[in-house]
Amino acid sequence: MKSSARRAKIKTAKITEENRQKILQALGPLRRKSAKRVVYKLTPNALKKINTRERQAISVSAAELRRGDKTVFFTPDTEKTIGDEQRDFFNAVKDPDGDYRMGSKSVSNSHDFKTPCNMAIADWNPERRFIGLLCERETAQAIDAWLKNSPQRFYAIEYAWKKGEHPKRGEFSPDFFIRKDKTVYVVEIKDDSEINDPSPENQKKFEYGRDHFERLNDWLKKEGINTTYQMNFLTPKSFNRFFIQLKNDEAKGFRSELDIVLGQGEGDNSA
């Protein structure tokens, strides 16, 4: 300290309060902790089977059906599964000239409705169109089964993202599972606007979803289970091409316009 004072031409043997403060300010950055970044790495520790019987029931309100905000798909066999207390309402829903005609869609042949559920509910217009394509005769003949996922608590994938400067963690439930032979196509439906301007949240859903199914496929392979999962983010712009390739047994490796855009933005899974 004394030698430093001499070099600084401080002739007195004392360090003034002003000099003391300057020294402390200069040493301040040395005490700072380096910036840290949180990186979430998910490690699987078990392969858990989920039966479609465990999927939670999905409901819809009369007002949503009346406005056409949501659409219920049903078949001639659906009425057999409806309880007495709900039968009058169901009959009103399926009436093609009734108050709920904007939110109801009849699938005339039950064999074309290849889902284990007695009904399916489309939450918005892109899903309505997608389910309609699933129920077309050529598609039904080309696939083994499909399932509309519940919004939560059935098959959900963890992901992390940033909203502004704030890290967020959550879960998303892919919209559809379509089984064809030994491949299960996992489909998340988005709007066409995402192609040109994808949200940061959807980019993270895509990254974590891809990582999830890569880990699942590796696990299935090690267990000797001959099933492969493929995830796609689809918008209405890609529907026709996806279903053509699905029917022609060419959908393995399919990438939609949105898949390509989201894939270009992949980085590390950090928040």
Image (spheres, rainbow, N blue to C red):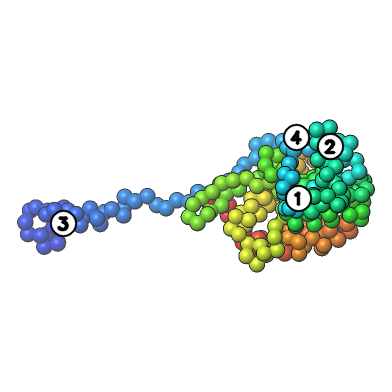
Indicate the position of residue 36 as horizontal and vertical percent values: 45, 51
The x, y position of residue 266, in whole percent, is 62, 59
| Real-space Cα separation, disc 4 to disc 2, in angstroms | 24 Å
Q: 138 or 271: which is nearer to us?
A: 138
Q: Are marks 4 and 3 in contact (CB under 8 Å)?
A: no
Disc 3 designates what residue?
19
> Distance between the Cα atoms at labels 4 and 3?
72 Å
- Observer-side mark, 1 or 3, equals 1
Q: Residues within 10 Å of mark 4 (few under 14, many from 20)?
A: few
Residue at the disc numbered 1: 66
Give me the residue at 61% from left, 44% from top. Answer: 42
Tell us which disc is closer to us: 2 or 3.
Answer: 2
Residue 67 vertical position relative to residue 220 in the rendered view, above or below: below
Upstream in the sequence, badge 1 or badge 2? 1
Pointer 2 residue: 87
Q: Nearer the viewer, residue 204 or 89?
A: 89
Q: Which residue is mark 4?
A: 54
User: Do tag 4 and tag 2 residues touch (Cβ < 8 Å)?
Assistant: no
Residue at disc 4, secondary structure: helix
